[in-house]
Image (cartoon, grey):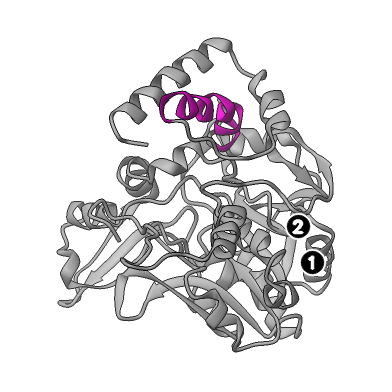
Amino acid sequence: MDKDGFNRPCIQPGITLPEDVSRQIAWSCPGLNVKPVQEDGVNRGVWGRLISLTTGYASDDSLRFNGATGGALSALQKYLLENGRVDAIVSVSSDPENPLLCAVSSFSDPTEVERRTGSRYAPSSPLQDIMAEIKKYNSFAFVGKPCDVSALRRAATLIPELKNKVRYYLSFFCAGVPSQNATSKMLEKMGLDDKNVVSLKYRGNGWPGFASAMDRQGKEVRMSYNDSWGKILGHRVLGRCKICPDGIGEHADITCADAWHCDEKGFPDFREAAGVNAIAVRTSAGAELFRDAVRDGYITIQDSDLSGSVLEKMQPYQAYRKKVLITRTLACFVTRGTFIRFKVWPALVNAIKINPLRHVREFMGTTYRVLKGRL
């Protein structure tokens, strides 16, 4: 972790990477390459290729309440373990030794799913020890950020052990990784010393739920989602995330998101309610898993055919960043010569869906951030 509160990869001093390892990194690293290696479904514009797009939630009321959204992602994990579809899940949860940090681990006990519910708005590197984790089991499902899923799926084309053992890739809509320093800032605003905190949950226990924390003296405090993410965490995300080609999990089998209720003006409404997920099924493996989980009562479908336009109202930020992707990455290329490899044609098609003046502003804004060292 660097001084800005982000996990950054580094090569140990005195070590030279073998050429084949460097090639594997260049092929897999989502900082360089975010191109799909598997494509199913039908192209749905800014939402990528889809087999189905629905809304729903965990049928288990406890999972639905404790989850960050509607608990659908947790319900899928529980279904996989209870029905023997995988031996284990690899995912991120709170570090038992430091609740402010993220920890990566594998687990095979279905009762562990509920303990691990909720979002983690802090740096995580779930692939850091992935080879050690998968050696413990014969099959597993991986749950991670869209960039993590992209890296793992591409790496699996090079590493037979990954290809044979990773049965499912599950993800969620991601707006960027907040700095660890942002968590400290949030706790400060909540009136707590981050060194004295014994429990921290960024979301959950309702929808959208509150950021909640407790210190060693038993003092419990909470902050609304609009204040925690909207005013603190969301303003301190990794620069690379601002030009991300995939915040919507296009490489996953199934991706879940907040199906925000919209007010009379069409804007997302963050008032507390029963959680509902938007569920994007992207591959044939994901379609089979989702069908069986619904059939066996793990997930309840609310809207069986969610339109892309309605999802855009629920997730306006994700739709917008897809439309300005080509402009932001072009600005980075012009100012510092770097360009992330992704599917350019869909990005161009998405770009014509907004006013050209938006692209001018985005180009100038991104150029400014690069020159100021913020990207």
Checking the image for residue 294, the label placed there is 1
Name which residue type carries label 2: Ile
Residue interval drawn in magenta: 318-336
Compared to residue 66, the image places residue 109 above or below, namely below
Instruction: Assign the magenta stretch its main secondary structure.
Output: helix
Instruction: From the top left corner, tell me how far across and down residue 293 is, in percent.
Output: 77, 70
Disc nearer the start of the sequence (2/1): 1
* Residue pictured at 55% horizontal, 61% vertical: 19
Checking the image for residue 301, the label placed there is 2
Instruction: From the top left corner, tell me how far across and down residue 210 is, in percent.
Output: 38, 57
Q: Is residue 206 visible?
A: yes
Image quarter of residue 315:
top right
Secondary structure beneath label 1: helix
Q: Extreme top residue here?
A: 357
* Residue pictured at 32% horizontal, 27% vertical: 371
Q: 141 or 32: nearer the eye?
A: 32
* Residue pictured at 46% horizontal, 20% vertical: 363
Q: Can residue 72 be seen in this view?
A: no
Identify the image quadrant of the N terminus: bottom left
Could you tell me if the residues under marks 2 and 1 are in contact, i.e. CB atoms within 8 Å?
yes
Secondary structure beneath label 2: strand
